[in-house]
Image (cartoon, grey):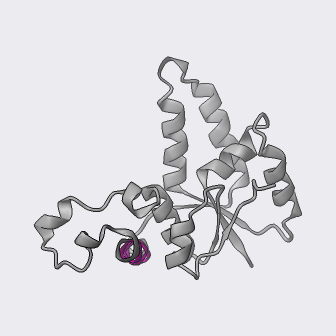
């Protein structure tokens, strides 16, 4: 059975019928056969909570609760990052570092005290949370469903399966 790990943007399109991408996501979900596993990372839930809570005075607790209720009614599995996820994450980040970090920083032996200033997500071309989601998708053999491009990640993780349900 194929399973899917849904990213924050896809979940937002699914929940919010006012979004242009909503219909495309609904059509893809309805086209799935035999109710495949739909999973979400706890990291994604954290991103959604941050999105609501960063609104300041516009924060709407009821809307946030409605959003999470909607998702919890439809999602089969919420994945935590665990001790095994670190291997996938470490391999992905190291591969990105080797290919995209500034040349002056590559291939240098690093002592632990030198690791406090890691390459930034901007330098590696992927947001840190997306890297963790990719690691979880690989760990659990799931298709990562996102509207993000992830070009650099795809060059170093050929085995990562990615779909964009919001594309038209």
| Residue for point 39% across, 57% down | 121
Q: Position of residue 149 (x, y in %)?
A: 61, 60
Left of 49 or right of it: where is 114?
Answer: left
Question: Which range is magenta?
Answer: 86-96
Q: Quadrant of the N terminus?
A: bottom right
| Residue for point 55% across, 20% down | 58
In-front residue for pair 2/122: 122
Q: Quadrant of the C terminus?
A: bottom right
Q: Position of residue 142 (x, y in %)?
A: 63, 73
Check residue 150 for magenta coloring.
no
Q: Quadrant of residue 112?
A: bottom left
| Residue for point 73% across, 76% down | 2
Q: Which residue reaches farthest front?
A: 103
Q: Is residue 143 above or below residue 123?
A: below
In-front residue for pair 46/124: 124
Check residue 92 for magenta coloring.
yes
Q: Position of residue 116 (x, y in %)?
A: 19, 60
| Residue for point 61% across, 34% down | 65
């Amino acid at each position: 059975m194929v399973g899917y790990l849904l990213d924050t943007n896809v979940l937002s399109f699914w929940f919010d019928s006012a979004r242009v991408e909503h219909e495309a996501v609904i059509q893809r979900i309805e086209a799935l056969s035999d109710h495949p596993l739909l999973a979400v990372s706890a990291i994604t839930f954290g991103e959604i909570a941050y999105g609501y809570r960063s609104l300041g005075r516009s924060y709407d607790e009821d809307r946030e609760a409605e959003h999470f209720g909607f998702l919890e009614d439809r999602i089969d599995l919420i994945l935590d990052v665990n001790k095994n996820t670190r291997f996938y994450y470490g391999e992905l980040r190291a591969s990105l570092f080797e290919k995209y970090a500034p040349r002056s920083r590559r291939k240098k032996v690093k002592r632990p005290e030198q690791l406090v200033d890691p390459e930034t997500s901007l330098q590696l071309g992927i947001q840190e949370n997306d890297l963790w989601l990719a690691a979880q998708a690989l760990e659990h053999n799931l298709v990562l469903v996102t509207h993000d491009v992830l070009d650099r990640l795809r060059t170093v993780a050929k085995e990562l399966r990615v779909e964009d349900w919001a594309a038209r």
